[in-house]
Amino acid sequence: MSKDCNTVWENCLAFIKDNLPDTHVFETWFKPLQPLKLDKDILTLKVPSMFFYEWIEDNYIDLLRASIRKELGENARLLYSVVMDTGIGDKSTRSVIPSTDKSATQNRPTSIPISSSPMREMLNPFVIPGLRKVKVNSQLNENYSFENFVEGSCNQLARSAGYAVAQNPGKTAFNPLFIHGAVGLGKTHLVHAIGLETKKRFPEKTVLYISAEQFFQQFVDSTKSNNRNDFLQFYQMMIDVLIIDDIQFFANKQGTQEIFFQIFNGLHSANKQLIITSDKSPADLSGLEQRVISRLKWGLSADLQMPDAPTRVEIIKRKLYKDGITMPEEVIEYLAYNVSTSVRELEGALISLLAHSSMSKKEITLDLARQMIDKFVKSNTREISIEYIQKVVCDYFNIPINIMLSKTRKGDVVQARHISMFLSRKHTQSSLAVIGSKCGNKDHATVLHACKSVQNSYDTDKKFRADLDAIEKKINE
Ligand code: ADP
Ligand code: MG
């Protein structure tokens, strides 16, 4: 008795449906397939797009194979016929086999970063399982690794959540992982590190880093060239870990938000990982639709702060070490304590200093650093920071900064702590509460008391006055 392809496929579908955990998968991936013909034990199925075919073959081939063998016996074979969207509204159907031929890529009308392939002839995925894993260029920068990312309390949560995500993409509660912080604090670096680590642990996973701006551009291009579906399917089906940088760029771009929303939902429900950065927290993002913002809050939102001075010292040292450059400790500290706006500016100051020294053939000294920083920092409106004051005070009395910040009540340490508070009140705009929190976690009353006691000693004790004047002079240098 010869079977017709519709009956065979209906039976296959029943079997597949029975063996899938949820009907959503069935509706999405199997319903759209259509039986075209049955030639002995070869069943041909029509697949809506290349991406569809990729997805099915990657995820459901075992189930598909089992269903067809059950119907047609051990020698059953499957042929896909993929509907080709040529981008000019002309859809043609072809039997396909993907090619690794690079030159073919250039014909692709969209700027989606894949090295995929228009197809030739035909494919029997049972015979050549997993042939052609379409390669996606991850766009990751090797320099932005975890090894090169200095840890500190400023980035602890974001870093450790990111690391956890890389160990288990899509399977932690941190989905999406949303990282926010002001410009130059390391968002881009951190998300590259997560991507690189994921690829290291799971080479078979497809990771894609893309800036929101690039994503927007691709989307606009795909709409123009009628490839919107390709665009959507590329993101929904090809990517295991999607990193979108600077999502604030989507503000007031309705179409892009709409497609992002769809992609987000598709990936999230398939347990794929999303990592998103922004210069604002989800609550402060303006110009984004509420439903998009609510998705961004689903997972974990972690912020990056400006690193404290010791972490900044470490960042400079790490960079110098990587480039094989040495620099006097005092110069490193000077830079770290004086540039407190962003890590990017800190790097800028370091690079200027190195460039200056190599061009003028001058050694890198504290003096040279001072000249440079003055020029550099002036244009960034330099402010004396509490940390810098603490550093000068501690250097003056030769007390390690961590001791001063500890709970110790030793006389000379207490004095240094009080002087730091006094000078912070005098030279910074910070409130008593902030000064207290940065000087060993004291409350504002303690700071007030310290300031009074310093003023009192200054008025009555000659040696103390000389010390304080000398420290103040150094701070104002
Ligand atoms: P953002 O994306 O937040 O604007 P970037 O990731 O571009 O910031 O970081 C700016 C520069 O600072 C980069 O060169 C980056 O390598 C460096 N940087 C930021 N944070 C760290 C860190 N914790 N350790 C090492 N380098 C860092
Ligand atoms: Mg960035």
Image (cartoon, rainbow, N blue to C red):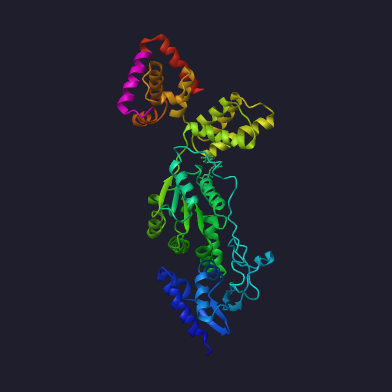
Residue 266 image offset from top left, x and y in percent: 45, 64
Considering the whole magenta stretch, tell me its main secondary structure. Answer: helix
Residue positioned 56% across, 53% down in the render: 199
Q: Residue furthest front?
A: 74
In this rendering, the answer to whether 384 lies above or below 2 is above
Residue positioned 34% across, 21% down in the render: 450
- Please state which of residues 344 and 316 is positioned toward the viewer in this rendering: 316
Q: Residue furthest bottom?
A: 1
Q: Is residue 295 left or right of residue 71?
A: left
Whether residue 140 appears in this view of the structure is: yes
**Is residue 453 rendered magenta in the image?**
yes
Residue 108 image offset from top left, x and y in percent: 62, 67
The total number of labels drawn is 0
- Please state which of residues 352 and 85 is positioned toward the viewer in this rendering: 85
- Please state which of residues 73 and 23 is positioned toward the viewer in this rendering: 73
Residue positioned 31% across, 21% down in the render: 449
**Is residue 67 rendered magenta in the image?**
no
Q: Residue furthest left?
A: 445
Q: Is residue 218 left or right of residue 263?
A: right
Q: Is residue 207 left or right of residue 427?
A: right
Q: Quadrant of residue 291?
A: bottom left
In this rendering, the answer to whether 87 lies above or below 402 is below
Residue 215 image offset from top left, x and y in percent: 53, 59
Whether residue 181 appears in this view of the structure is: no
What span is in magenta? 440-457
In this rendering, the answer to whether 476 lies above or below 208 is above
Q: Quadrant of residue 88?
A: bottom right
- Please state which of residues 75 and 249 is positioned toward the viewer in this rendering: 75
Residue 114 image offset from top left, x and y in percent: 60, 62
